[in-house]
Amino acid sequence: MSYQILLNKLPGNEDVPTPRKMSELASGYDLYAAVGEPVELAPGERALIPTGVAIAMPAELEAQIRPRSGLAAKHGITCLNTPGTIDADYRGEIKVILINLGQEPFRIERGERIAQMVFQYIPKTVFVETDELPDTVRGTGGFGHTGRG
């Protein structure tokens, strides 16, 4: 099954690449920085980076914004609020909150790949209030209940 995603490249961003998959079986579409001037992130600093695009998708989808593994591994650049969620009714510009967890400043240039966008199916759900939940082996065991970490 395929879904149609409408993409609006915002004015002044004609030179910024359209989100794209970098291989046939990739699950994420790379997003590109649409910064007017280069942004330098010092270690520990974060910034909201525009992508120059807005989308419209069917109601049963959400778009998740995730870090690019290469930026994270090589430079310590990742996304805060990850995965970030773009709801089906949002029509504004997609922006990515990047943070530098590395030890060196990192410069973000216009047109650079900064994150990836993955589409997920969101089922319709209904809460049914009850006084009791069915038992499971795990029960109420929470954080770390199965051992270290």
Image: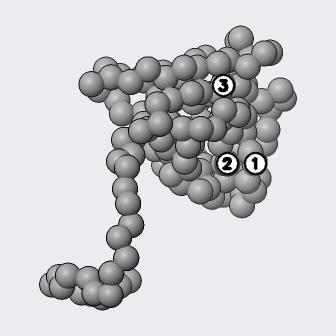
Report the Cα–Cα distance between label 1 and label 3. 18 Å
Q: Mark 1 is on which residue type?
A: Ala
Q: Mark 3 is on which residue type?
A: Val
Q: Left or right: 139 with respect to 67?
A: left
Q: Which mark is residue 53?
A: 3
Q: Secondary structure at mark 2?
A: strand
Q: Earlier in the sequence, mark 1 or mark 3?
A: 1
Horizontal and vertical percent for residue 41?
75, 48
Vertical comparison of 94 with 5: above or below? below
Q: Are the residues at dot 1 and dot 2 in contact (C-beta closer than 8 Å)?
A: yes
Report the Cα–Cα distance between label 2 and label 3. 15 Å
Horizontal and vertical percent for residue 82?
53, 54
Q: Earlier in the sequence, mark 2 or mark 3?
A: 3
Q: Left or right: 48 with respect to 127?
A: right
Where is mark 2, residue-wise? 97
- Closer mark to the observer between disc 2 and disc 3: 3
Q: Which mark is residue 116?
A: none
135 or 30: nearer the viewer: 135
Vertical comparison of 78 with 148: above or below? above
- Closer mark to the observer between disc 1 and disc 3: 3
Which residue is pictured at 28% across the width and 87% down the height?
Answer: 132
107 or 59: nearer the viewer: 59
Report the Cα–Cα distance between label 1 and label 2. 6 Å
Residue 43 placement: quadrant: bottom right
Horizontal and vertical percent for residue 42?
76, 53
User: Is residue 59 in view from this perspective?
Assistant: yes
Quarter of the image where the C terminus is located: bottom left
Where is mark 1, residue-wise? 47
Report crowding for label 2: few under 14, some 14 to 19, many 20 or more residues within 10 A (C-alpha). some
Which residue is pictured at 61% across the width and 55% down the height?
Answer: 80
